[in-house]
Structures are given as structure tokens and as C-alpha cells.
Image (cartoon, rainbow, N blue to C red):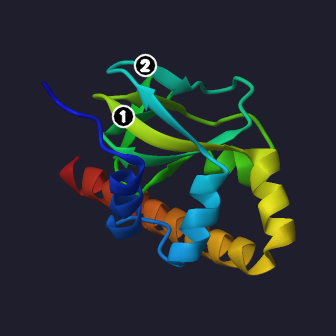
Amino acid sequence: MSTRPSQDQLLASVQTAKNRLQYLSHNDWMLLVDHAKQVTFKKGEVFIQQGSQSKMIYVIGAGKVNVSISGMGLAQIGPGEICGEMAFLEDSRPSATATAEDEVQAFCIEWQKLIELFELFPHLGSRFYRSLAVNLSRRLREQIALKKTMKTQM
């Protein structure tokens, strides 16, 4: 029987993960977690559906998430990584589906709460957006490298 990680364990996980929101300070994380809801998704559960209305961002605390577009696997993300950020940035519907590969523990925060936090704490917003930019740049580079590898194998 497995036990679920506590909020403190999840927070430690997202703060030390390889692909985390690296520019956020401990105090930034405390503010975000204080305004977020801790959620659990069962294996196979879809929590972001491509094209469906969603106004939440998820920070993965434990478990793995499969990201797909039109049923085609795109990436797998894990602790410290974020889902729903592109829809947030673009104020649009999600461009991909996020499905729990195994049990997933996450922090979810409504867009409006996030915006309110950024208005109250502009430096938090600055560090958050910088972290997102770095993560999106890394993901783009990974996709480019993958395409190059696929081309050379043809």
C-alpha cells in the first residue's frame, strides 16, 4: 500500500525537480501553494482536454503525465513541470491533452488567482514568466532535436 506524499513533500519535489520553474524562490512557492488546491488524478484520468475550456494551471508534484495532441504522444512530464501554461499565456483553450500515466499528485491554481497574485506581487509574476519562458524554450529545443533525429533515421 502506497502512501500519498504530504503537501510539504510535494513542495520539496517541485522545488528541486530538474525541469522545475527554476526562478521561483521558496517564498514564491509558498504563495502559489497557499492559493492552489492539491489534487490527485488516477491512472488514465484526463485532466486537461485539448480544445476544451480550462482555466487552470497544474504543477506536477508526483507521478508522470502524458501530453498528446489529437491522440498522438508528444511528451511525458513529471514532478516540477507544469501543464496548461500555454493556454494561460495565450488566454485560449488547451492545445494538448494531459493524461495521468500513473497516479498523479499536483497543485492546481485558477488563472484568475494567479493573475491576482501577480498584480499583488509583480516580482513573483516576473520570475514565474521567466521560468515559463525557459521551460518552453527547453521543450522547443527538445522537439527540434527529436525531429532532427527522426530525419537522420529515414
On the rendered structure, is 42 left or right of 85?
left
The quarter of the picture where residue 15 lies is bottom left
Q: For the residue labelled by badge 2, is the local secondary structure a helix, a strand or a loop?
A: loop
The quarter of the picture where residue 127 lies is bottom right
Residue at 39% from the left image edge and 38% from the top image edge: 105
Badge 1 local density, few (<14 within 10 Å), some, or many (20+)?
Answer: many
- Residue 31 visible? The answer is yes
Q: For the residue labelled by badge 1, is the local secondary structure a helix, a strand or a loop?
A: strand
Tell me which amino acid carries mark 2: Glu
**Residue 150 shows which numbered tag?**
none
Residue at 78% from the left image edge and 40% from the top image edge: 92
Q: In the rendered image of this protein, does residue 31 appear above or below residue 57?
A: below
Q: Nearer the viewer, mark 1 or mark 2?
A: 1
Check the picture and name the quadrant holding the N terminus.
top left
Q: Which residue is mark 2?
A: 45
Residue 65: x and y, percent?
Answer: 37, 37
Tell me which amino acid carries mark 1: Val
**Residue 104 shows which numbered tag?**
1
On the rendered structure, is 5 left or right of 45?
left
Residue at 66% from the left image edge and 35% from the top image edge: 94
Badge 2 local density, few (<14 within 10 Å), some, or many (20+)?
Answer: some
The quarter of the picture where residue 118 lies is bottom right
**Viewer-proximal residue, 54 or 27?**
27
**Viewer-proximal residue, 6 or 53?**
6
Residue at 50% from the left image edge and 66% from the top image edge: 135
Residue 73: x and y, percent?
Answer: 38, 33
**Viewer-proximal residue, 67 or 151?**
67
Residue 102: x and y, percent?
Answer: 28, 28
Whole-number angstrom distance, CA of label 1 to CA of label 2: 9 Å
Contact (Cβ within 8 Å) of mark 1 with mark 2: yes
